[in-house]
Amino acid sequence: MSLDKHGIAKRIAQEVEDGFYVNLGIGIPTLVANYIPDGMNVVLQSENGLLGMGPFPTEDEVDPDLINAGKQTVTYLDGSSLFSSAESFAMIRGEHVQLTILGAMEVSERGDIANWKIPGKMVKGMGGAMDLVASAKNIIVAMQHTSRDGQSKLLKNCSLPITGLGCVKKIVTDLAVIDVTPEGFRLLERAPGVTVEQIQAATEGTLIVEGDIPEIKV
């Protein structure tokens, strides 16, 4: 069975390392805050001006004045700080964020990402995505492998307006964990019960399969 959005977030949390400063994009990436391993020192940053985000609040913890970039209520940890978006983007543009986790509408086999606009449809806008993809040392994408009508979102070439070129390093979808390499998408892991053939059928771009592909463990 494919992963749900929480499963995707749990798998991406395994990529976070002790001491990292991490930016979480809107959508599935925000859920990663709930699955940081206990005892790991990770500082989560939101580009609207918050450093030190914690997990999503319980009903009793909700503070309507404390939100992330997606306008969701969040918690903050001891030692966290609030500041202007100008200072936040100075952190991002100064390459002080080790890992950025973003959602995407499309990713090409070269690591191009499209995640800010669908022509003719209302979307929230680019937000901080273009600054993040231009400045982050490592970018992991959390996304659905296919669109609602079954079309692949892992493509040879993006069809939607590009956010950044050749910047994505890894993709975690509901079907698979994939590295982006100069040769194309390299399949690393598959969702429980999902076959390599199913992933191949759902991937338009070049998919490299080497040896036995283990199941994702979350």
Image (cartoon, rainbow, N blue to C red):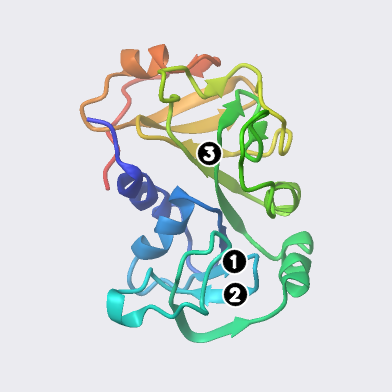
Q: Which residue is mark 3?
A: 170
The residue drawn where x is 49% and y is 70% is 42
Against 152, residue 101 (above or below) is below
Tell me residue 43's x, y (percent). 53, 72
The kind of secondary structure element at disc 1 is strand
At label 1, which amino acid type do we have?
Ser
Tell me residue 164's x, y (percent). 73, 38
- The answer to whether residue 187 is left or right of residue 185 is left
Task: Identify the mark nearer the N-term, 2 or 3.
Answer: 2
Tell me residue 135's x, y (percent). 74, 53
1 and 2 marks in contact (CB < 8 Å): yes
Q: Nearer the viewer, residue 60 or 36?
A: 60
Tell me residue 41's x, y (percent). 46, 74
Q: Compute the Cα span from label 1 to label 2.
A: 5 Å
At label 2, which amino acid type do we have?
Leu
Q: Which residue is mark 1?
A: 46
